[in-house]
Image (spheres, rainbow, N blue to C red):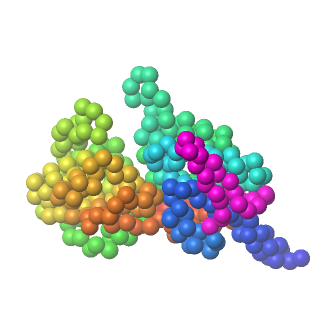
Amino acid sequence: MPKNTIFASLKHNMETDVRIFSGSATNTLAEQIAKSYGKDLGKMSHYRFSDGEIQVSYDESIRGQSVFAIQSTMPPADNLMELLLMLDAAKRASAKEIIAVLPYFGYARQDRKDQPRVAIGAKLVADMLALAGATRVMTMDLHADQIQGFFDIPVDHLYASSIFLPYIQGLNLPNLTIAAPDMGGSKRANAYAKHLKSEIVICYKQRTKANVVDHMTAIGDIEGRNIVLVDDLVDTGGTLCKAADMMMERGALSVRAVCTHAILSGKAYENIANSKLTELIVTDTVPLKQESPKIKVISVAELFAKVIHSVQNYESISSNFIM
């Protein structure tokens, strides 16, 4: 058999061996990923006992298959538990490979001991995923890049910049300035600013407790600029909204924000609606709890589908990254 025919046959087998399944938290996104990939979403049963206990099962054979289990692990913790059960079930059903696809990796903010006697939640989750049966992990915009080092299995870390940057460029904003909402986001903001050839501003905030910003100022020129804040996630929206209000008071022409993961807990929707943000652009790694005229959602389905295809065919995925 000719060499190119052998490779074509192997590639065909790799494609047909792919099975994509979804947890209950991100079913809509998983359906879009499967559609973009060219597959139907695999059939699973998700059962909940009267006490709240979860049980999952695959309703089709996955023996010798490459299983992609898609589930974001935002609160409640049931979402993480459901994914772990999906991985364990795939392992016990003799899947060849088990790829845990976490569009949003929960507990990523607990990536170090920032005070005595606290857990490192991100490391614990990494260990649980591998122990449950994951042979590979695929995720997007981790809160801290070093979390990849918590795993002893391969990690494909995707960046939402590949979809956010074209959107920002399409706005054609004059006097564009990229801003980091805090010191920790300066690396991300610098990468965006470098690609867009724009100015950069870094906000400095002081907190007395989590999710509460007491004071904020900014380093850089704001007056007469169209500001775009960039961050990996938006939770209560307190930091973004305070930054937007502060910048508008200091003479900014407009303030937008792009955030990959729309956690939006507590009074986030109210905070955003009452802020001076022109718009908040997010992805669908976490489904919105409600619609808002200020919030625009850009899907990551096609990007995940492309990377799944590349991983399955042992192709480079670096072309999908801008950062």
**Residue for point 17% across, 39% down:** 215
Q: Is residue 141 visible?
A: yes
Q: In which quadrant of the rendered image does the N terminus lie?
A: bottom right
Q: Which one is nearer the viewer's eye here, 302 or 227?
A: 302
Q: Which one is nearer the viewer's eye here, 8 or 270?
A: 270
Asked if the magenta segment contains residue 63, the reply would be yes
Q: Residue furthest right?
A: 1
Q: Is residue 140 left or right of residue 237?
A: right
Range drawn in magenta: 41-69
Q: Is residue 300 left or right of residue 185?
A: right
Q: Position of residue 224 (x, y in %)?
A: 13, 62
Q: Residue furthest top?
A: 116
**Residue for point 19% across, 42% down:** 216
Q: Is residue 82 left or right of residue 143?
A: right
Note whether 256 is above or below 271 in the view shown: below
Q: Residue furthest front?
A: 50
Query: For residue 24, what is the image quadrant?
Result: bottom right
Q: Position of residue 76 (x, y in %)?
A: 46, 45
Q: Position of residue 319 (x, y in %)?
A: 54, 65
Q: Is residue 193 visible?
A: no
**Residue for point 44% across, 56% down:** 286
Asked if the magenta segment contains residue 151, the reply would be no
**Residue for point 77% across, 75% down:** 8
Q: Is residue 261 left or right of residue 17?
A: left
Q: In which quadrant of the rendered image does the C terminus lie?
A: bottom left
Q: Position of residue 161 (x, y in %)?
A: 41, 61
Q: How many callouts does the rendering have?
A: 0
